[in-house]
Image (tube, helix red, strand yellow):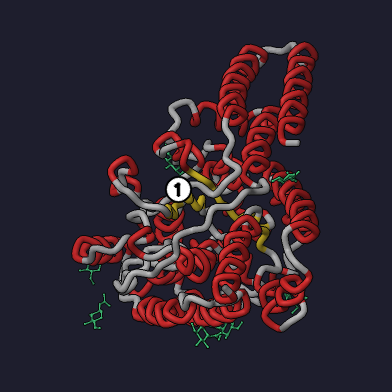
Amino acid sequence: MRRMVHPTLKLMLLLLMLLGLVSILVNASSIQSDFGHCDRVVKRWAFSSLDQEIKEDRHTLRDLLFFLHVPRTGGRTYFHCFLKKLYSNNLECPRSYDKLRFDPSKTKCRLLVTHDDYSMMSKLPNQRTSVVTILRNPVDRVFSTYEFSIEVAARFLLHPNLSSAIQMSGRVRSKTKGVSTLDIWPWKYLVPWMREDLFARRDARIQKGSRDIKSNFSYDIEDIVMPLHKYINDPVAHDIIHNGATFQVAGLTNNSYLAESHEVRHCVQKYRILGDHVLQVAKVISQLRASNTSMKSVSNKKSEQSPSILDSDPDNNDHQNSSSDQNAGQLASNEDGEAMKENMTVEDLMEAYEGCISSLRKTQAARRTASLKRISPANFSKEERLQVPEMLLEQIRSLNHLDLELYKYAQEIFEKRHKHTMEKLITAEMWESMFNNSYGGVFWKVFPLVMTIILLFCLFVLFVNARRRTSKVKI
Ligand SMILES: *[C@@H]1O[C@H](CO)[C@@H](O)[C@H](O)[C@H]1NC(C)=O
Ligand SMILES: *[C@@H]1O[C@H](CO)[C@@H](O)[C@H](O)[C@H]1NC(C)=O
Ligand SMILES: *[C@@H]1O[C@H](CO)[C@@H](O)[C@H](O)[C@H]1NC(C)=O
Ligand SMILES: *[C@@H]1O[C@H](CO)[C@@H](O)[C@H](O)[C@H]1NC(C)=O
Ligand SMILES: *[C@@H]1O[C@H](CO)[C@@H](O)[C@H](O)[C@H]1NC(C)=O
Ligand SMILES: *[C@@H]1O[C@H](CO)[C@@H](O)[C@H](O)[C@H]1NC(C)=O
Ligand SMILES: *[C@@H]1O[C@H](CO)[C@@H](O)[C@H](O)[C@H]1NC(C)=O
């Protein structure tokens, strides 16, 4: 079955390349040579990527699980509340969010969690690595990126001026061993950018002597924060936010290990039609990964060692004292203890997951509220998102057209797999425990927007393990 899928995709790619060729012929202008160059660069990359992908068969959960964490997709929760329950701490690779600190060839670990893009695979034992990622509705992802970069940057406003903020954060970082948000791609670009912007706006306000700023629309308060429409049109956003999920899955981000990635990415950003090649590669990668499995079980014997106190997930970590993060770590560790009982059932796991998620949510909400106070009256909320003009939303969709298509495609795969799995792998009883009881209900509620391509793939592990345990008990 798989063998039939790949040639089809390859054919589609060929067709798309022909399309590109036609557009060269039509477009006989002076930019032709640049386009021609880009066209060749992108195609060469696409062909070599596909070639490599198609040769490989990664349908089983391999020795190393690489969680390719697309920023702002709920990856922290997934990692903290789910993966950590499957992998003990000693199986976790040193965090590689800060890639200077990580050399995968030197470590014998089984779980790698990072914002690095797919080009990271060139550093990993290819034959022994499985990849998991989470995709989220691209428009929500852009909103979340905007809000989070402002949220983190706003914490610095406690300092009297920008230079003192930079100085202080540098000092704190060199003292603590933890990874700071400011070390981690893409926040190492987005946060300083927003920080500088927030201070500039505050200084201007002080100079003007303007006091009461009244506004009921947080996404456009020019006096306090960069309005959303400016943010999404900035070159930085073009460089690292738009179509970010597709570029990350294809290994073409601004953070890529692949030498030609920057040229390919710039070409694709310049000539929209070339994006189709990237999309095809991303789809093939997703297709291979989202596949159905003969599953090996993950070793999940928890070690005694306590979890690292400073959680380095960049989605919510920074240079400041993070007592709330420590609490979250503590809470999670308690739940780990429970979750790792030998005869844990799917329901137990879901219950632990639910508890873990709600405690994470609470600490995150508290930090966010505290941080946004500094830029009041700007106070981002779901309700206000509904007030964002349709024109702006349309622009976001257009800027993220590749991500939208990849997301749609992933949803389709997911539904297909889901159906197939339900028919084939899950017994009626499991189905019931999964969907009819309250935990099942909660489980689907916690992922209303976040689409997991391969979450299901991981769930298989749970099912397999749960089943094995049950049968062990019976014997
Ligand atoms: C920034 O604030 C610090 C601490 O208050 C002060 O010492 C320094 O002179 C200020 N720098 C500028 C450029 O205003
Ligand atoms: C803000 O207030 C104005 C009138 O005061 C109203 O027309 C507008 O809909 C409000 N916007 C939001 C986002 O509430
Ligand atoms: C990545 O993007 C940031 C922000 O636009 C930029 O400062 C940086 O130079 C870029 N890095 C590469 C390798 O292109
Ligand atoms: C899943 O794998 C089984 C064999 O393990 C195969 O028969 C089935 O066709 C596969 N399904 C998909 C959707 O690939
Ligand atoms: C961190 O917390 C400790 C006490 O828990 C406090 O003494 C220290 O000043 C705090 N540091 C920062 C940067 O807030
Ligand atoms: C788990 O198994 C032990 C025996 O191995 C049993 O005493 C205990 O009641 C079981 N717990 C649950 C929740 O089934
Ligand atoms: C922002 O909104 C949240 C609820 O959405 C509220 O709890 C919080 O107090 C508000 N913050 C400010 C500064 O108005």
Decide: is 334 above or below 280: below
Is 419 on the left or on the right of 196, as rendered?
right
Residue 237, x across and y down, in percent: 55, 48
Determine the residue located farthest toward the front in the rendered image: 475
Residue on which the image places disc 1: 63
The amino acid pointed to by label 1 is Asp
Q: Nearer the viewer, residue 184 or 117?
A: 117
Quadrant hosting ligand 4:
top right
Which quarter of the picture shows residue 268? Answer: top right
Is 171 on the left or on the right of 387, as rendered?
left
At numbered mark 1, what does the secondary structure look like: helix, strand or loop? loop
Which quarter of the picture shows residue 145? Answer: bottom right
Residue shown at 32% from the left, 49% from the top: 108
Residue shown at 30% from the left, 47% from the top: 107
Is 104 on the left or on the right of 376, as rendered?
left
Residue 338, x across and y down, in percent: 46, 81
Residue shown at 46% from the left, 41% from the top: 128
Residue shown at 57% from the left, 32% from the top: 56
Decide: is 267 above or below 235: above
Residue 221, x across and y down, in percent: 59, 68
User: From where the camera sits, is residue 115 visible?
Assistant: yes
Image quadrant holding the N terminus, namely top right
Q: Nearer the viewer, residue 86 or 445?
A: 86
Residue 165, x across and y down, in percent: 30, 65
Q: Residues within 10 Å of mark 1 (few under 14, many from 20)?
A: some
Q: Nearer the viewer, residue 255 or 81?
A: 81
Total label count? 1
Image quadrant holding the C terminus, namely bottom right
Decide: is 153 above or below 15: below
Decide: is 128 above or below 109: above
